[in-house]
Amino acid sequence: MAPVVVTVRLVRSFEHRNFRPVVLHGVSLDQTVHEFIQLVRDDIATRPGLPPPFRKYAYDTMKIIHQAHGAKTNELVMSLDDDKLLILQCGQTLRASGVANETEVAFFRKEDYDLYKANPKTVW
């Protein structure tokens, strides 16, 4: 299978809607989620134009936001629904997790997500 393009949304703050998209080309869907997380961490550590707060943040969880040609959520950062289905599990491959060409995934800290989900208020 040919490598695909995956957009990773680096979520720094849910409350402040602070995120940055990063496009990764040539992603193999046969790698595990754990390997992909490490690939993204390595990429953002040296990516030019990415502010230091996004580079050094302790991201640890990925969740599918959007599939190509599918409906998008109305949430500005990401949907709070279907966690069991959409949060990627480390032992699975990207393909088994439902990632395909032009999938958009959020990369965030699980602790921040849980706090925001318990009290989903935004700060402007």
Image: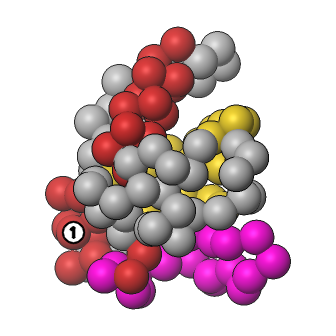
- Does 108 appear above or below 89? above
* Identity of the residue furthest to the front in this view: 1
Image quarter for residue 23?
top right
Colour setup of the view: secondary structure
In the rendered structure, does residue 71 fall within the stretch colored magenta?
yes
Q: Is residue 92 visible?
A: yes
Observer-nearest of 15 and 54: 54
- Give the SS element for disc 1: helix
* Identity of the residue furthest to the right in this view: 69
Identified at 38% across, 38% down, the residue is 35
Observer-nearest of 88 and 19: 88
Identified at 48% across, 57% down, the residue is 94
The amino acid pointed to by label 1 is Asp
In the rendered structure, does residue 101 fall within the stretch colored magenta?
no
Q: Position of residue 13 (x, y in %)?
A: 39, 51
Observer-nearest of 50 and 93: 93
Q: Tell me: 41 left or right of 74.
A: left
Query: What are the residue bounds of the magenta stretch?
Result: 65-84
Q: Position of residue 45 (x, y in %)?
A: 45, 18
Q: Which residue is mark 1?
A: 114
